[in-house]
Amino acid sequence: MVRQSYLLPLFLLFGACSSESEVAPPPVDSVGEGAQADAVMADEIPRELRGTWGMTPGDCDDSRGDAKGRMEVEADRLVFYESTAMLDEISEAEPHRLIAIFEFEGEGQKWSRKIALEVEEDGQSLVRRDLDDQQLTGSLSYNRCTA
């Protein structure tokens, strides 16, 4: 029994002097080369969503004063016929999609809404959904206005 008690410290000493070192492998870079082109700023509306959108062709006509289905999407706001919505908090952002809370102001009132915006693959169609509005349960479809 006495022999075994001397062997344990000896094994520990040799283990500590081992030439093998435990080095963690280098971190794997999960971002591909093309990721920079698809990067989305965390505090802006994605570029693919920006522009002027209309629910009807008449909404794209600047000379009309009644373009009630017109929506202008800028980096930090949505501009409608009688209201403006400032970007407040982004929940989800991808190059073609955004879910965020917007602070609205218009006609003497202020309110907050969680909105989803998504551009279709063709880049010419956009769908807007008001996620927390009990009165507006469906989606609204817009077409990109040409210059």
Image (cartoon, grey):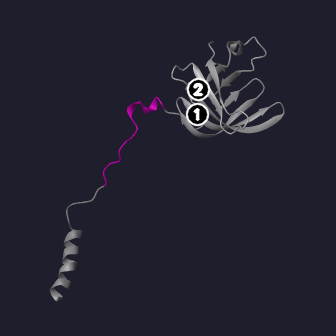
121 w.r.t. 99: above or below: above
For the C terminus, the quadrant is: top right
The three-letter code of the residue at mark 2 reads Leu
The quadrant in which residue 58 appears is: top right
- Please say if the residues under marks 2 and 1 sit with CB atoms less than 8 Å apart: yes
The answer to whether residue 41 shows anywhere in this view is no
The residue shown at (56%, 39%) is 92
Q: Which tag, 2 or 1, sits closer to the chain's start?
A: 2
Q: Residue furthest bottom?
A: 2
Part of the protein shown in magenta = 24-38
Residue 114 in percent (x, y) is at 66, 38
10 Å neighbourhood of mark 2: few (<14), some, or many (≥20)? many
Please identify the dominant SS of the magenta region: loop
Q: Give the residue number, with chain letter if any, for mark 1.
A: 98
For the N terminus, the quadrant is: bottom left
Q: Give the residue number, with chain letter if any, for mark 2.
A: 49
In this view, the residue in front, 52 or 117, is: 117
Q: Secondary structure at mark 1?
A: strand
